[in-house]
Image (spheres, grey):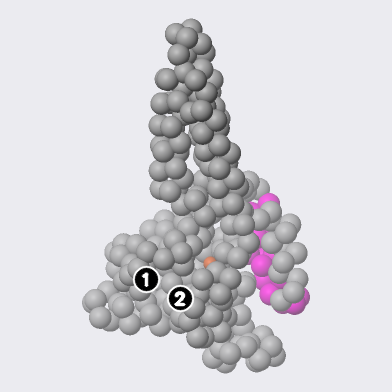
Amino acid sequence: MNRDKGDIVDPIDIIEYFYPQDTLLRELLIWHSEQVRDKALQIAKYNKKMNLDKDVLINGAMLHDIGIGKCRAQDIYCLGTEPYIQHGILGAKMLREYGREHGLDLEVYARICERHTGSGLTAEEIKKSGLPLPDEDFLPETPEEKVICLADKFYSKSDCMKEKKLKNVVRSMEKFGDGPQQRFLDLCREFHMQKIPPVTTAFMEALAFIILDLIIAFFSICLCAYWKSLFLVKIVFILFFFLRTHYFYRKRLLLRQDVWLYQIFYFILVAITSLIH
Ligand SMILES: [Fe+2]
């Protein structure tokens, strides 16, 4: 087992090397990887005795799906040619080549890439299902490989990006058969997943921002009623519309449908306020 930390890397530099353009795919890849990173760090927090390597967890989570751009999955903006199931081994190959070219040891992250699919895959399962993968075991072995494999199962890039409940993740593993599902349950037991609550998501932060937003709007209305002028209300509303849009952009929430609906609702509110004399 390789518990080597590898060389120090900035995962964003590597992502930008392979995804130089600011596309929806890069946005989605970073967003999903950050979700997996936060979940992995949360698992580490609840398993302090295991002494998990946080740098490996952070970089590994950010790089685990680096290979998706070479695969075909149009619903998540992947316009490559290879089958999606290969994204792990392709990502591992990309990292090994990048490491060779830049004089970096990225083997620890390459292993995370190739061992995070499902609950890992055995040579027997690959052969039995006729998967287009090499005839060998791709099972997570180090604690960090296991944590990232586990954390990844709580998020889907094609769904609404919300964290899944543990019982739903377990149910979703049924389709892979008894072996993979049992392996997943063993991982859950090893890392005490039943005791770990959902991660506070960026959406919750946005919700707190929206509540604050409404409180400020309410107080500005009260102030303007006192001053008998709507001018300040209009300024405050418009200012907060732009501030919030900037905040949602920074938090990568602008792709979310519910955030867009809220933005449209708020924009209508600003427009109506502007029409009032
Ligand atoms: Fe992933």
Q: How many marks?
A: 2
Q: Which segment is the magenta one? A: 177-194
Secondary structure of the residue carrying numbered label 1: loop
| SS majority, magenta | helix
Residue on which the image places disc 1: 19
Do we see residue 141 in this rendering? no
Looking at the picture, how far across and down is residue 54, in whole percent?
42, 56
How many residues crowd mark 1 within 10 Å: few (<14), some (14–19), many (20+)? Answer: some
* Disc 2/disc 1 C-alpha distance (Å): 8 Å
Position in image of residue 127 (x %, y %) = 65, 92
Q: Nearer the viewer, residue 175 or 262?
A: 262
Say which residue appears at 46% left-offset and 64% top-offset: 24
Residue 193 shown left or right of residue 72 in the figure: right
Label 2–label 1 contact, CB within 8 A: yes
The relative height of residue 124 versus residue 27 in the rendered view (above or below) is below
Count residues near mark 2 (Cα–Cα under 10 Å), then give few for <14, some for 14-19, many for 20+.
many
Q: Is residue 179 magenta?
A: yes
Depth check: 156 or 105 in front? Answer: 156
The residue under the point 48% across, 28% down is: 274
Outermost residue on the top side: it is 226
Q: Say which residue label 2 marks.
A: 69
